Image (cartoon, rainbow, N blue to C red):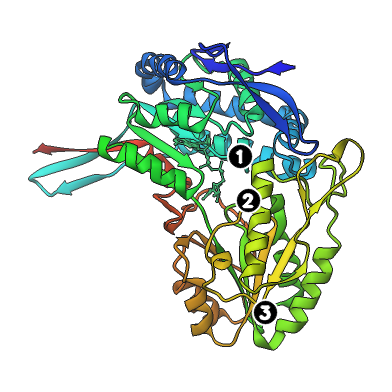
Amino acid sequence: MLKIRNYINGELIAPISGNYLDNINPSIGKVYSLIPDSDENDVQLATQAALAAFPTWSKTPKEKRSRILQKIAFLIEDNLDKLAEAESIDNGKPLKLAKTVDIPRAASNFNFYATAILHFASESHSMEDTAINYTLREPIGVCGCISPWNLPLYLFSWKIAPALAVGNTVVAKPSEITPMTAYLLSEICMEAGLPKGVLNIVHGLGHKVGAAITSHPDIPVISFTGGTVTGKQIISTAGPMFKKLSLELGGKNPNIIFDDCNFEDALRTTVHSSFANQGQICLCGSRIFVQKGIYEKFKKAFVDKVKDLKIGNPFDENTNIGAVVSQPHLEKVLSYVELAKQEGGKILCGGNRVLLDGKFSEGYYLQPTIIEGLAFNCRTNQEEIFGPVVTIMPFETEEEVLMMANSTKYGLASSVWTENLKKAHRVAANLHVGIVWVNTWLLRDLRTPFGGVKQSGVGREGGFEALHFFTEPKNICIKL
Ligand code: TXE
């Protein structure tokens, strides 16, 4: 049984405690590897390595940092098949998705920030003949990066790439549910010649390793992606320590379809935005609002398409829906289907666990599920389910759908489908979210600000937003 190891001070080492946790392959429901059950002692070791590496790495010319990070990007691309298979086994997602989205995006994340730092500049402010001000944007020190299980390497690299690019060192913790690609990245970093201690990866449980990172006095910056509940725990620890925080949390995203939409585009994309990655993307459109004029037509066409989705072995290239990530998550999602029924919902399709045969018989498979007839403000429509479950509701007017769309405690993303340009601008301006897609979904330019409002998070990732987050501005005023 493979025992993965922590990556500390440039070496792959066992947890100090010698204890390990089971790592389960969700598509077959069986343990297939072991991960370190690390604790605060391992985090201390990693932090000491990161502190020791900071002076040299932060002073390394950006061109050299850039070359090393581009080498990492190249090696990720060069190991695409191996990394994609590891991601699919660890998460349950279709191999096709890991190959076309997760792993290529991880390479892009490294490449994007390796090149961004070559163009990252700061400002100066002239006070005519009195003085000149110039702003330095300097690396901060040891950054803590904590990431979730839904897009493991994609989101892990989305944090550590900018942090390293600007000259910080990092203590990182991937989710204990999907640690494998972060472990493989350790080997890639060693091959790329990343100096020891610059990146340290400590595997283990959130309340032990994650909490130790969040509370460590020598880690002044925390970048976190995960659930809103955990985000609150992190704020309560890191806030009083005056740490710099970036929190990418949950979502309950509205997908608003007006009757003047391009019907086929809206239909095809809605199937994808509802169930990609088994609905385990915080950007998925989980509340579908369809204008009355096309509601019945759209509903029927949507249900028919979803019933045709193939659920099964993630390694089968025809599979559309793989396994959800864990037994507890399977139970959580099914509990929301039961809640929807209690709240008066009608299951139009799905709603059940799927028992496959052979070696997949104990995998965590769920039918893609569509529910109608619920009130916009019931719990099913207000709480994040984070699985292959969507609700569909009719609306009449723009004002009505904006009220319903904006009614949750979340505010991450939204899609809007209309061929009317004025309406598109007007509706987008009135949605309380951080990201609006018009006539598309998940079309991403890495230069754009990424993140949400309300309880979807604090701060933004992406582009120079991330470089600003991982640096401290200092203004220096020189009298002339
Ligand atoms: O989160 P958890 P999950 C959200 C998504 C869903 C959730 C799924 O909407 O709600 O994240 O990810 C570590 N102190 N997003 O269930 O449990 C834990 O070990 C410090 C939004 O994994 O919060 C894991 O590594 N760390 C996002 C990480 O936190 C702790 C995109 C996340 O775990 C901890 C992806 C603690 N006390 C998912 N407890 C977006 N907006 O982009 C746990 N952890």
Query: Can residue 167 be seen at all in this image of the molecule?
Result: no
Q: Nearer the viewer, mark 3 or mark 1?
A: 1
Q: Earlier in the sequence, mark 2 or mark 3?
A: 3
Q: Identify residue type, mark 1.
A: Trp
3 or 1: tag closer to the N-terminus? 1
User: Would you place residue 307 above or below residue 359 in this image?
Assistant: below
* Residue kind at label 2, given as amino acid type: Lys
Alpha-carbon span between mark 2 and mark 1: 15 Å
In this rendering, the label closer to the viewer, 2 or 1: 2
Residue 89 x/y as whole percent:
75, 34
Kindly identify which residue carries mark 3.
Answer: 261
Mark 1 surroundings: few (<14), some (14-19) or many (≥20) residues within 10 A:
many
Q: Which mark is residue 332?
A: 2
What's the CA distance linking mark 2 and mark 3? 34 Å
Residue 13, compared with residue 309, is above or below; it is above
List the residue tagged with mark 1: 149
Location of residue 459 in the rendering, given as x and y in whole percent from the top left corner:
39, 49
**Quadrant of the rendered image containing residue 204:** top right
